[in-house]
């Protein structure tokens, strides 16, 4: 990423004529353009293959990884990454997220039946912020895991009850609280949205410039790609938003001036606790065994995740939070693509590793000079850990099991 | 328009020692303080002041500078490139001001409703939602776009159609670009005479930053927009007084004298 000189560039073109629609790069805005001949060649080589019935999906040079994908025969996305450790798996997810983000904001219709290219280009600008957040996920991982990131909520029961009542009064079944772009609480129907929708919605709310309230038209990429709904957001506190998905009623004015004060004002203190300093780490009072630098916990059934690259006690050991995040992402991508089957994912091209064995991997570890990493696939959870290099390799497994137990109470390994 | 500048609100009060104390409730170490919907500025007991809340709909054609203006007034980063606003976004801005007649300090709470012109045309619930229970409407034109100025009369009648009880204020945006202006002082004077509407001028450009080189200097930012915030306060407060029968309604035909 940026600090190591690696870069990621995403190109979007019309599939039929190869007209560039936009180009986004990680880093300075001046990088947001690639020379036209380069764009032309990248698209040309893919089209050339297509004309010969060859589907070009990915290519590698010594320092750059390129992945192509065409969506609905209408939009071509191409990603180029010179980041160390870039993988087909991670770049494939990036393309998928980017296209779904476009559907979320513009609707499928406008992307599939392109009538006016200039209009489309203009409309696509509304997606830039969200797409850019996929190019620079920093300390996040939901884009990769497709499991919405959650924050632990103190006083959860009282807030949940209030959320249900608030959504009910707004005639909506879909309500949630988003803290710093992560999901704090949600109504049951909200959890029934597609995992990618859960993810996109909280990343969208986290990526928009701050506003007291919004009435934002959205299309659900899986549930309602052509019929818009209204996403209402109300900023209860800076960094904490109550969100609803609604039909034509109620009016934003009613929600903002009547429902918000009525339901949320009495809960000012518990709400403040949701945004106080250490937001996205551990439930209050939980500590992790020494040597754990970062963790990513996936709740398999709910398709949600929890993570931290600076859990309490991991202090200044070795890697910076940014490097830990990157290492954890790479480890996840490696394990998810090769060793752990991941139900319901748009299957990435599997390497034939699995095929040679009658059984499936349940544990997996990697040892490098700067860190060790360990993953557990348990019935209800997946846990990915980054550990200090001084932790003895033979101790990784019990240590990981203990961490899982502390995080979840899950002992069934 | 029956209010002349400075007749209702003390214009430079925010620079006085007393005004500065009130300003301190919306600043933290020279940064603007931001408030969620369930919060408000906290005043020490000896400074107690009422809050006057207004919903203000910001209208104007695409690219005229609605979003930039609201960001500037709120002390947020002004976007450098034009991205059409998706749907409706609202922003609250608190502004302490002093009433000239009673000498009373008030906290004004402006609630701006900004929607993209394209979104407004695409979805029909947006315009009614913005107008619902609005107290005021701002009509924006840009000093660098003559057509946006010429379009004001039709914009005003289009937007206010069917409801007349809004305080109407015209805002000329991109006033910092006066070198390239398409709209002259004469044009403005003529417009004021014909329409009897106040005209304010807005420069929505990011001001100086604090020592870290990133955070906007909130105090400097407020100083840049104080005249606009006072202008809004003045017209909205005055209209309230008229509605409540506390001051007489303006007589038709009174000559407009103010230079805003
Ligand atoms: N120099 C200067 N530029 C401005 C000013 N106001 C707006 N702009 C620029 O004009 C462009 C459009 O401004 P916006 O505020 O996004 O326009 P809008 O009225 O919200 O447009 P829609 O959302 O499409 O309806 C942006 O690039 C702004 O930076 C101003 O006062 N001075
Ligand atoms: Mg706008």
Image (cartoon, coloured by chain):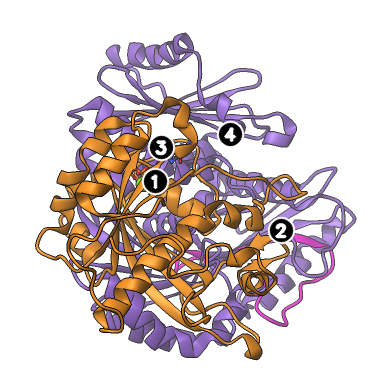
Chain colours: A purple, B orange
**Front residue of this view, candidates A373 and B246:** B246
* Disc 3 residue crowd, few under 14, some 14–19, many 20+, Cα 10 Å: some
Q: Residues within 10 Å of mark 4 (few under 14, many from 20)?
A: many
Q: Chain of mark 3?
A: B
Comparing marks 2 and 1, which lies closer to the viewer? 2
Mark 3–mark 1 distance (CA, rounded to whole Å): 36 Å
* Residue A396 vertical placement versus A370 (above, below): below
Q: Which residues are magenta?
A: A282-304
Q: Which residue is mark 2?
A: A309
Spatial separation of the CA atoms under disc 4 and disc 1: 25 Å
Are the residues flagged by discs 2 and 1 from a single subunit?
yes
Left or right of B112 on screen, residue A366: right
- Mark 1 chain: A
Residue at 37%, 43% (x, y): give it: B172
Tell which subunit mark 2 falls on. A
In the rendered image, residue B225, in percent from the top left (x then y), is placed at 52, 54
- Looking at the rendered structure, the secondary structure element under dot 2 is loop
Which element carries disc 1, helix, strand or loop? Answer: loop
Q: Which residue is mark 1?
A: A346
Which residue bears the numbered disc 4?
A: A26
Tag 4 subunit: A
Are both tags, 3 and 1, on one chain? no
**Neighbourhood count class around disc 1 (C-alpha, 10 Å): few under 14, some 14–19, many 20 upward:** few
Residue lying at 35% horizontally and 14% vertically, measured from the top left: A49
């Amino acid at each position: 990423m940026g600090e190591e000189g690696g870069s990621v560039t995403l190109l979007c073109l019309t599939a039929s004529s190869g007209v560039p629609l936009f180009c986004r790069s990680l880093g300075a805005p001046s990088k947001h353009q690639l020379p036209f001949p380069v764009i032309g060649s990248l698209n040309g080589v893919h089209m050339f293959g297509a004309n010969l019935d060859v589907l070009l999906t990915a290519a590698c040079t010594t320092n750059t990884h390129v992945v192509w994908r065409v969506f609905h025969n209408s939009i071509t996305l191409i990603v180029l990454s010179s980041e160390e450790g870039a993988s087909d798996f991670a770049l494939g997810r990036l393309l998928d997220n980017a296209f779904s983000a476009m559907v979320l904001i513009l609707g499928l219709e406008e992307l599939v039946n392109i009538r006016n290219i200039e209009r489309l280009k203009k409309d696509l600008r509304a997606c830039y912020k969200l797409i850019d957040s996929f190019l620079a996920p920093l300390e996040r991982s939901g884009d990769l895991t497709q499991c919405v990131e959650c924050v632990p909520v103190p006083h959860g029961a009282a807030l949940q009850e209030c959320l249900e009542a608030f959504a009910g009064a707004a005639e909506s079944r879909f309500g949630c609280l988003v803290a710093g772009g992560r999901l704090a609480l949600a109504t049951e129907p909200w959890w029934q949205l597609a995992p990618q929708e859960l993810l996109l919605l909280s990343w969208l709310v986290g990526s928009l410039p701050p506003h007291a309230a919004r009435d934002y038209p959205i299309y659900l990429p899986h549930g309602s790609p052509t019929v818009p709904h209204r996403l209402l957001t109300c900023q209860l506190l800076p960094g904490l938003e109550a969100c609803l998905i609604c039909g034509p009623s109620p009016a934003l004015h009613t929600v903002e001036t009547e429902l918000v004060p009525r339901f949320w004002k009495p809960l000012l203190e518990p709400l403040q606790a949701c945004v106080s300093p250490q937001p996205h780490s551990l439930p209050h009072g939980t500590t992790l065994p020494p040597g754990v630098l970062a963790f990513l916990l996936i709740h398999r059934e709910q398709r949600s995740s929890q993570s931290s690259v600076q859990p309490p006690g991991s202090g200044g050991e070795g890697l910076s939070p940014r490097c830990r995040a990157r290492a954890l992402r790479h480890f996840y991508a490696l394990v998810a693509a090769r060793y752990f089957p991941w139900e319901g994912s748009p299957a990435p091209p599997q390497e034939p590793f699995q095929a040679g064995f009658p059984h499936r991997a349940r544990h997996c570890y990697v040892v490098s000079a700067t860190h060790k990493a360990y993953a557990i696939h348990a019935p209800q959870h997946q846990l990915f850990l980054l550990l200090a290099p001084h932790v003895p390799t033979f101790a990784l497994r019990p240590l990981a099991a203990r961490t899982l137990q502390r995080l979840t109470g899950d002992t069934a390994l | 328009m029956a209010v002349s500048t400075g007749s209702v609100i003390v214009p430079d009060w925010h620079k006085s020692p007393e005004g500065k104390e009130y300003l301190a409730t919306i600043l933290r170490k020279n940064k603007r303080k931001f408030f969620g919907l369930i919060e408000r500025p906290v005043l020490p007991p000896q400074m107690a002041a009422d809050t006057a809340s207004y919903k203000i709909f910001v209208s104007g054609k695409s690219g005229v500078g609605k979003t930039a203006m609201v960001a500037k007034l709120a002390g947020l980063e002004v976007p450098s490139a034009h991205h059409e606003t998706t749907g409706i976004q609202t922003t609250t801005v608190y502004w302490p001001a002093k009433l000239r007649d009673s000498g009373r300090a008030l906290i004004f709470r402006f609630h701006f409703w900004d929607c993209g012109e394209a979104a407004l045309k695409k979805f029909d619930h947006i315009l009614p939602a913005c107008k619902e229970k609005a107290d005021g409407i701002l009509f924006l034109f840009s000093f660098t776009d003559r057509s946006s100025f010429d379009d004001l009369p039709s914009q005003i009648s289009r937007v206010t159609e069917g409801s007349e009880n809004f305080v109407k204020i015209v805002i000329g945006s991109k006033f910092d670009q006066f070198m390239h202006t398409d709209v002259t002082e004469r044009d403005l004077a003529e417009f004021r005479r014909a329409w009897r509407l106040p005209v304010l001028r807005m420069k929505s450009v990011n001001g100086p930053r604090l020592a870290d080189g990133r955070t906007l200097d909130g105090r400097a930012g407020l100083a840049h927009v104080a005249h606009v915030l006072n202008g809004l306060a003045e017209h909205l407060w005055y209209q309230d007084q008229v509605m409540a029968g506390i001051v007489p309604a303006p007589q038709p035909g009174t000559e407009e004298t103010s230079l805003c």
